[in-house]
Amino acid sequence: MTDQPQIIVDKVSHLYRPPNGRPVLALEDISLDVRPQEFLALLGPSGCGKSTLLYLMGGFIPIETGSISVGGKPVKEPGPDRGIVFQHFALFPWKTVRDNVLYGLEKGGLPRAEREQTAQHFIDLVGLSGFEDSYPSQLSGGMKQRTAIARTLAIDPDILLMDEPFGALDAQTRHLMQMELLSIWRKRPKTVIFVTHDVQEAVYLADRIAVMSARPGRIKTIVENKLDRNDPGLFKSPAFAEKVDDIWTLVRAEAMKMQGVRAS
Ligand SMILES: Nc1ncnc2c1ncn2[C@@H]1O[C@H](COP(=O)(O)OP(=O)(O)OP(=O)(O)O)[C@@H](O)[C@H]1O
């Protein structure tokens, strides 16, 4: 890991202008550097603009104020260097697991046999061997999300943008998926930006945690996470509970501000 930032977010603000409603200032003056191959969590209360920031980095919505660069180039549109995984699985229901994973590889110009080999490699990596011919309706939530992750990983992006990818899963599956994601990330290190409003999830997964303020979203603070995430007992350790508690205190203040905003 070098210390040169791979992603530079510089003074970004974002105003939504819905056709039938008041404009919403979702982000204000966000500056953030992300290092290559670091796992960064974007943490904050609901509505603070986490997804908006992720989509701006992905090039899915235009940047109007400030700038974002990836590898020194300004972000103008989505690109194969940035893969995204959404909360809701976004699979093609009429395609099998194999074909869903192959879909992302179709544009790459690789021969069919090579594409199939790559797809199989990532299906195995996410633990779905034996389910290649299943359709999404035949899979559990966790398996659907694994398929979506395999599809994104198969394209081999340098950067993974993950928008609450485990938010729709039950607590047990969620923890298994977190462990699996860490293990995949160790095998194939990538820059990961992981949006969550779950403090435990952020502390369990991330090298650094950017805590965002209530709307308009700003970066309130960035916390370095020095806990040993290779430690299998980490989740149950006092140090983990203490870190979660410290960060929860920061987030709670913002969540309460958000409630106030809603109540007014
Ligand atoms: N297309 C849109 N038009 C108008 N306002 C929007 C639009 N998308 C998001 N917003 C508003 O911008 C703010 C930030 O939304 P965003 O989805 O980025 O927040 P978030 O932190 O990801 O929330 P959550 O954790 O609930 O998913 C919210 O107040 C939301 O209502």
Image (tube, rainbow, N blue to C red):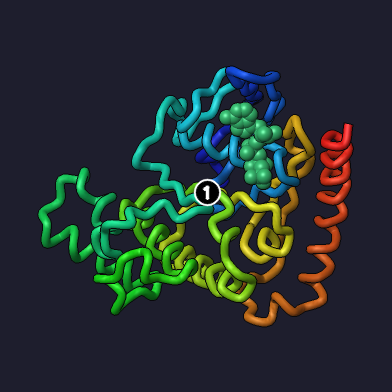
Q: Position of residue 201 (x, y in %)?
A: 66, 62
Q: Relative to 47, say whether 119 is above or below.
A: below
**In which image quadrant can residue 264 be found?**
top right
Q: In the shown orientation, is residue 26 left or right of residue 154?
A: right
Compared to 108, does 229 lie above or below? below
In the rendered image, the residue lying farthest to the bottom is 233
Q: Secondary structure at mark 1?
A: loop
Q: Nearer the viewer, residue 81 or 176?
A: 176
Residue 165, x across and y down, in percent: 54, 56
Give residue 30's quadrant in the image.
Answer: top right
Q: Is residue 118 above or below residue 10?
A: below
At x 82%, y 36%, the residue is 262
Confirm whether residue 1 shows in the render.
Answer: no
What residue lies at 25% left-to-right and 68% top-to-bottom?
Answer: 120
Count neighbours of disc 1 (C-alpha within 10 A) and say few if under 14, some if 14 to 19, many if 20 or more. few
Comparing 247 with 19, the one in front is 19
Answer left or right for 150 relative to 222: left
Q: Amino acid at mark 1?
A: Thr
Residue 180: % across, % down? 50, 71
Residue 78 image-quadrant placement: top left
Q: In this view of the protein, can residue 208 be seen by the observer?
A: yes
On screen, residue 259 versus residue 62, left or right, reads right
What residue do we see at 45% from left, 36% from top? Answer: 71
Task: Give the quarter the ligand 1 occupies.
Answer: top right
What residue is pinned by disc 1? 2
In-image side of 61 versus 154 (left or right): right
* Residue 8 x %, y %: 56, 33
Residue depicted at 18% across the width and 63% down the height: 116
Vertical position of residue 75 compared to residue 36: above or below: above
